[in-house]
Image: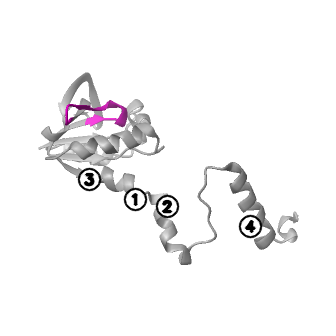
Amino acid sequence: MKILFVIDKVEYKYFEFNNLVTNFWMIKQFRKACDVSITTVSNLSLVGAEAYAACNEVSIVGEDIVYSKRVSLELIDSFDLVFFRPDPPVDNTYISATYIFDFVKRARVVNSPMAIRNFNEKLHSLMFREYMPNTIVSASLEEIEKFLRCLMVEKIEPSAFDYVE
């Protein structure tokens, strides 16, 4: 079985510091019985209508996982299983990666990039407003500051700021 992990740039950079890699245990367990490769969202591409990834093969050395410095361009559909595991920021590169995965037809993808793109976890929580405090989602610093000022007036009494020795 061939498995691809799409990880974030920080994990890729510090991959051989195994404790910093959040996917370390999954990768290590799969590598015992499968061919495992890693890539990042910035290493994904479309050639025609086929999705590709510039990959590094993973191996186990002693108790550690390491990756080959040799990069190979692989058709994503040549993998049996793909774990889409990069952390945000949800920027243009990240969003583009989710669109590239729209062209993956055969490989089974865990953490559907389309679902991640279309159903943002931060916004999804707003569907359950009755279970959460007042919330704002905004790119406007001015709007956020205004929201916080309103909360301070409503919720925090001046005595809450008194220093007690």
Q: Please identify the quarter of the rendering in which residue 86 is found.
A: top left
Give the CA separation, mark 1 to mark 4.
Answer: 28 Å
| Whether residue 101 is situated above or below residue 149 in the rendered picture | above
> Quick check: can you spot residue 13?
yes
Which amino acid lies under the numbered mark 3 shown in the image of this protein? Val
**Label 4's element?**
helix
Q: Residues within 10 Å of mark 4 (few under 14, many from 20)?
A: few
From the top left corner, tell me how far across and down residue 135 is, in percent.
62, 65
Give the number of marks: 4
Task: Report the front residue among 2 and 24.
Answer: 2
Task: Report the front residue among 155 and 14.
Answer: 155
Which amino acid lies under the numbered mark 2 shown in the image of this protein? Leu
Seen at 30% across and 36% down, the residue is 64
Check the picture and name the quadrant holding the N terminus: top left
| Whether residue 162 is situated above or below residue 114 in the rendered picture | below
Give the CA separation, mark 2 to mark 4.
Answer: 20 Å
* Circles 2 and 1 in contact, beta carbons < 8 Å: yes
Q: Which residue is mark 4?
A: 151
Q: Which residue is mark 1?
A: 119
Give the CA separation, mark 3 to mark 1.
Answer: 15 Å
> Quick check: can you spot residue 21?
no
Q: Which mark is residue 74?
A: none
Which amino acid lies under the numbered mark 4 shown in the image of this protein? Leu
Which amino acid lies under the numbered mark 1 shown in the image of this protein? Phe
Give the CA separation, mark 2 to mark 1.
Answer: 8 Å
Q: Is residue 14 left or right of residue 70?
A: right
Q: Which residue is mark 3?
A: 110
**Label 3's element?**
strand
Which color scheme does this rendered protein use?
A: one colour
Q: Earlier in the sequence, mark 3 or mark 4?
A: 3
**Label 1's element?**
loop
Q: Which residue is mark 2?
A: 123
